Amino acid sequence: MNTNAQRISATPPDTISVIGLGKLGASMAASIASRGFNVIGVDINQRSVDLLNAGRAPVQETDLERYVSDNKSRLRATTDHIDAVVNSKLSFVIVPTPSDDRGAFSLRYAVHAFRELGRALKQKADYHLVVMTSTVLPGSTRYGLLPVLERESGKTCGPDFGLCYSPEFIALGSVIRDFLNPDFNLIGEFDPGSGERLADCYARIMTNGAPARRMSLENAELTKVALNTYVTTKITFANMLAEICEKLPGGDVDAVTNALGMDTRIGRKYLTGALGYGGPCFPRDNVALSFFARAVGANAELAETTDHINRDLAERAVDRLKHLIAPEATVAVLGLSYKPASVVIEASQGIRLVKALSRAGWRVLGHDPLANDAARVELQYHALVVDALDDCVQQAEVIIIANPDPAFKRMAGMIAESGKQVIDFWRLLDKDLTGAGAQPDQYIPYGRGRDDAQAGMVLKRLWAQEKP
């Protein structure tokens, strides 16, 4: 009988520590506390520690302030790893793993955290489970991080402590909801005992009874980055269809993708057909998977192509708009964050679109409900960022919808009355403006055919029968 499995298949821990209080770490800490656990947060940033101890959210994220406030009796924070580890039974590690110059995920912050965890484990007599949550590439946990724990603690993984790799599948702006209601929990386990303990813990935390998929550390590491890469490939496929639909008589990407999504082999999610993907995860995961494939002698051309197409999408879009927008027009781009309800502008298609428009010679304004401050720094040489949505719209002749934030829908009436030209990459205002007396070039929904006569002539030339 496996005595180690016997030893650690007891009741899941009632006190959990979370190492790293960024957007995911702080949200996880508050979410876990809301499920009745005591939670100790750890961060090297004293301000984040002080805010959490005061019952305040250390970062901006949807519902985080409320979750911290409602559960402050079960939440505390410290800069001391030993305090956190000695007084908990499980530690989630959520620290940055930034891309390095190879395109791989750097372990430098994770190594520091695992060094501190190892030193804390040395001070602890009983068993402790360490769970790496940050995205890493295959082999990182076993060969890059585990040796640090064993060296610093003087202990052996398995009999003395457990180790899992278990990333979360969340999106910024909905971290708490996504964390508590996952499709499944991915568990990469050093040994069955480690995986069993984490699976039991997740069963108490998650609100939707999500199943666990347990596997080796390396398979879980690959699954995480592969899932994100697959989603971006699906997004890019839909964007390709949108571009094709613009060249068809009566082309309509929504008609096509809605039908495609009914096939259970495909599904409707991430099949919109609009601007490309962005943010801190999706773009770099394609690059990282490509790097890893090359490093082990495999081929990942699909991931490389997806990344290349996505990076060039804004420039290609501007090229297609040149004959639609007057050279002297002022253009307002609405949506500068990489997605609605986020302050993050990293790899944002809205930011790329502003820069492409500016390089092409237009005067550009920008607005975002949350990301104006960050965008103002990034776009200081490319655009004027306007704080009020109404002012931004009023000052421009052309309005471009770059992300589907619901806040932009309230401008539909004003835009319709003003006769301003609208280019809507997400077809957000379709029901409000289509058929409302707008001229053909006044409301332009991306992914729809615009010149049926020209498109018909192209198809006629393509398929006309040869004369005998």
Image: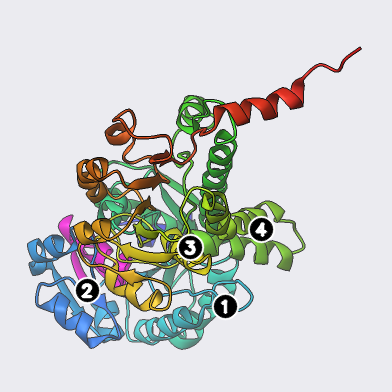
Question: Spatial distance from mark 2 to mark 1, Cα to Cα?
Answer: 30 Å
Q: Which residue is mark 1?
A: 100
Q: Residues within 10 Å of mark 1 (few under 14, many from 20)?
A: few
- Residue located at (49% from left, 48% from top): 324
- Label pair 3/2, CB-CB below 8 angstroms: no
**Residue 347 sits inside the magenta stretch:** no
Q: Tell me the tag on residue 357.
A: 3
* Residue located beneath label 4 in the image: 304
The amino acid beneath tag 2 is Ile
Q: Give the extent of the magenta segment.
A: 11-39
Of label 2 and label 1, which has the lower sequence position? 2
Residue identifier under label 2: 40
Camera-nearest label, 3 or 2? 3
Residue 184 position within the rendered picture, expressed as x and y whole percent measured from the top left: 40, 45
Residue depicted at x 56% and y 71%? 140
Structural distance between the alpha carbons of marks 2 and 4: 40 Å
Mark 1–mark 4 distance (CA, rounded to whole Å):
17 Å
* Circle 1 SS class: loop
Helix or strand or loop: what does disc 2 sit on?
strand
Q: Nearer the viewer, residue 206 or 330?
A: 330
